[in-house]
């Protein structure tokens, strides 16, 4: 419900400022390489809205929607590390810099704004790419997130299984928002 309310509020705040695009397909994934075991999870339920005219973008990711190959990993992730009951989502609100809707081909861009994860809000400035394909916009980024930056603790007994940082991949296909 909170995810839906966030999306509605973001949609309303964008009305009247130019062409809006919303997520049609979304993939937020992370990968962690550690000495004993690699950890990978995917979330295909993220929501996003992007205003071409202003460059404003927002997204919301429900933490519980990350899917793992092993059920036990998913349980530990939600209960012990991400404390999903207490911190149910991650959000980003900011701007895309460097995107030109009149240009064809792959464009190098930057996402700049505030990300909130595990109750911690930080300034984020990450590179990515955007490309117009027909009436869709493809948006991709890969960046590193350090657990310590978001107060995510790693038990000392798990140091060989859980890395201190994870590679985060964002892959959205956006379609025009129709009222």
Image (spheres, rainbow, N blue to C red):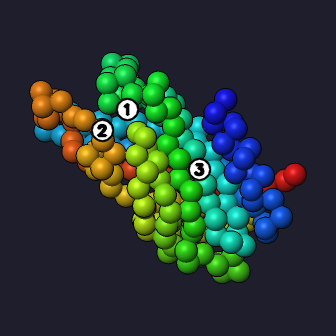
Q: Is residue 166 left or right of residue 125?
A: left
Judged from this view, the residue extending furthest toward the right is 179
Q: Position of residue 112 (x, y in %)?
A: 49, 66
Classify mark 2: helix, strand or loop: loop
Occupied quadrant, residue 69: top left
The crowding category of the residue bearing disc 1, from other C-alpha atoms within 10 Å (few below 14, some 14 to 19, many at least 20), is many
Residue depicted at 37% across the width and 58% down the height = 143
Task: Specify the quadrant that holds the N terminus.
Answer: top right
Q: Is residue 18 left or right of residue 2?
A: right
Q: CA distance from mark 3 to mark 1?
A: 18 Å
Check disc 2 and report the residue beneath it: 152
| Residue 59: numbered disc | 3
Check disc 1 and report the residue beneath it: 82
Q: CA distance from mark 2 to mark 3?
A: 21 Å
Residue depicted at 42% across the width and 61% down the height = 123
Classify mark 3: helix, strand or loop: strand
Q: CA distance from mark 1 to mark 2?
A: 7 Å
Asked if the residue under mark 2 is in contact with the one under mark 1, i.e. CB atoms within 8 Å, the reply is: yes
- In the displayed structure, 108 sits above or below 114; it is below
Q: Earlier in the sequence, mark 2 or mark 3?
A: 3
Classify mark 1: helix, strand or loop: loop
The crowding category of the residue bearing disc 3, from other C-alpha atoms within 10 Å (few below 14, some 14 to 19, many at least 20), is many
Of tags 2 and 3, which is closer to the observer? Answer: 2
Q: Position of residue 79 (x, y in %)?
A: 37, 22
Front residue of 171 and 62 = 62
- In the displayed structure, 179 sits above or below 44; it is below
Q: Position of residue 89 (x, y in %)?
A: 51, 37
């Amino acid at each position: 419900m909170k995810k839906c309310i966030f999306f509605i509020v973001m949609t309303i705040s964008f009305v009247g400022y130019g062409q809006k695009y919303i997520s049609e397909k979304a993939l937020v994934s992370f990968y962690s390489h550690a000495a004993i075991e690699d950890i990978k999870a995917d979330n295909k339920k993220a929501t996003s809205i992007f205003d071409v005219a202003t460059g404003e973008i927002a997204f919301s990711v429900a933490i519980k929607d990350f899917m793992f190959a092993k059920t036990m990993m998913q349980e530990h992730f939600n209960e012990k590390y991400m404390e999903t009951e207490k911190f149910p989502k991650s959000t980003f609100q900011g701007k895309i810099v460097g995107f030109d809707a009149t240009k064809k081909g792959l464009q190098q861009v930057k996402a700049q704004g505030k990300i909130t994860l595990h109750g911690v809000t930080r300034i984020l400035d990450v590179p990515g790419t955007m490309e117009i394909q027909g009436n869709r916009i493809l948006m991709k980024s890969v960046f590193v997130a350090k657990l310590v930056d978001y107060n995510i603790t790693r038990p000392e007994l798990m140091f060989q299984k859980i890395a201190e940082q994870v590679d985060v991949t964002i892959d959205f296909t956006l379609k025009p928002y129709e009222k």
